[in-house]
Image (cartoon, rainbow, N blue to C red):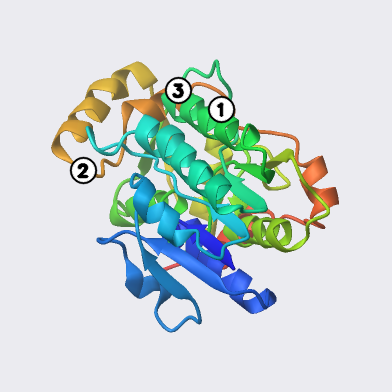
Amino acid sequence: MILVTGGTGFVGRNVVKKLLRESNQKVRCLVRKTGRREVLEGLRLELFEGDIASPESLDLAMKGVKTVIHIVGIICENPPEVTFERVHAEGTANVVAAARKAGVKRFIHMSAMGARPDAPARYHTTKWAGEEAVRSSGISFVIFRPSIICGEDDEFVNMFAGIMRQTWFLPVFNVIGSGQVKMQPVYVGDVAHCFVRAATDKSVKNKAYDLGGPEQLTIDEIMDTIMKVIGAHKKKIHMPIAAAWPMAYMMEKISKKPMLTREQLIMLRSDNVGDITDAKQDFALEPMRFEDAIRTYLAPK
C-alpha cells in the first residue's frame, strides 16, 4: 500500500494518476474533511479522511502502508492555522513520526529548489526543516526539490496567461523586479514521472534531487514565452520589488489566497535553478522544454 498526502493538489493528482496507471500497488490518499475529493473521483484508490496536523488520524492512515509519498505544501499562508512552519516543518514531522511508528519502509518527499537552512525566505527554510525530519527518520528516503512546476491547472503560468488575456487592450505588461532572475520551470508530468519511479524502484535511496526543466530562463524569457504561446503582443515594463511591497501587504490582508505575497517578493530576489544531472540519470528523466510543456495546455484564444 502506498499512502499519498496532498493527492488532491495540482502535483498530487498528477502523481496519483500516473501511479495508478503504471503501478499495481494499492493507493490510499489522505484527504482533509474540506479537501477537494471530486478531483479524484472515478479512480481506483482509497480515500482516507485525515490531516497532517492530526497525529491520531495519521496513525490510522498508515495501517498497512509500506511507502509514503508526501506532497503537501503551501505557497500562501493563512495564519494562524496555515503557516509555512505548521505545514512544511511540523506537518512533515508528524507524517514522518507516524510512518516510523507504522514501520513504513520508504518515504518520498517533495521539498523545493532552494531549500536550505540559511535561505532568506521562510518558505525555503521551512522546506529544509521538513527535509531534516525525513533525513533523520531512519526510513529509506528520496527527496525531490522542484523549481516552478507548470502544467494544466498550475497557478503560475495560468495566472500570467490569464492576466495577459484579460488586459488584451493594453500594450504593456507589468513585470515585478528586473526580469533577470532565473528559474528552471519543470513540467508536472516530469515531476510525476520521478515520484512514481522513486516509489516503485527501490534501487535509489537516501538522496535528494533538484528537479527542473532543461532550460534556465529569466523571468522576462518566461513571460515572452507565455505571450508567444497565447498569441499576445505586449511590451514588458518593470516595477521595482520595493514598490510592489505595499501591494503584496494589502493583498495578504484582504484575501485568503492573495495573487502576490511578500514572501514571493523575497524569493524574486534570487535565482531558483539547480543541477538536474543526477535526476536525469537515476530516473531516466528527459525533461520537457518550457515552451513545449505549456503548449500542452495553453492555446491562443
Q: Is 86 placed above or below 46 here? A: above
* Residue type of the residue flagged with mark 1: Val
Report the residue marked by disc 3. 121
Task: Tell me where residue 175 appears, x and y as whole percent.
Answer: 41, 34
Q: Quadrant of residue 23?
A: bottom right
One can see residue 164 in this view: no
Q: Quadrant of the C terminus?
A: bottom left
One can see residue 286 in this view: yes
First in residue order: circle 1 vs circle 3:
3
143 to the left or right of 278 = left
Report the residue marked by disc 2. 256
* Residue type of the residue flagged with mark 3: Ala
Name the residue at 67% across, 78% down: 24
Q: Nearer the viewer, residue 66 or 204?
A: 66
Task: Tell me where residue 76 appears, x and y as whole percent.
Answer: 33, 39
Numbered mark located on residue 101 in the image: none
* Residue type of the residue flagged with mark 2: Lys
Label 1 or label 2, whichever lies nearer to me, is: 2
Name the residue at 50% across, 82% down: 44
Q: Nearer the viewer, residue 78 or 53?
A: 53
SS class, disc 3: loop
Name the residue at 32% across, 54% down: 168
Report the residue marked by disc 1. 181
Name the residue at 33% across, 50% down: 163
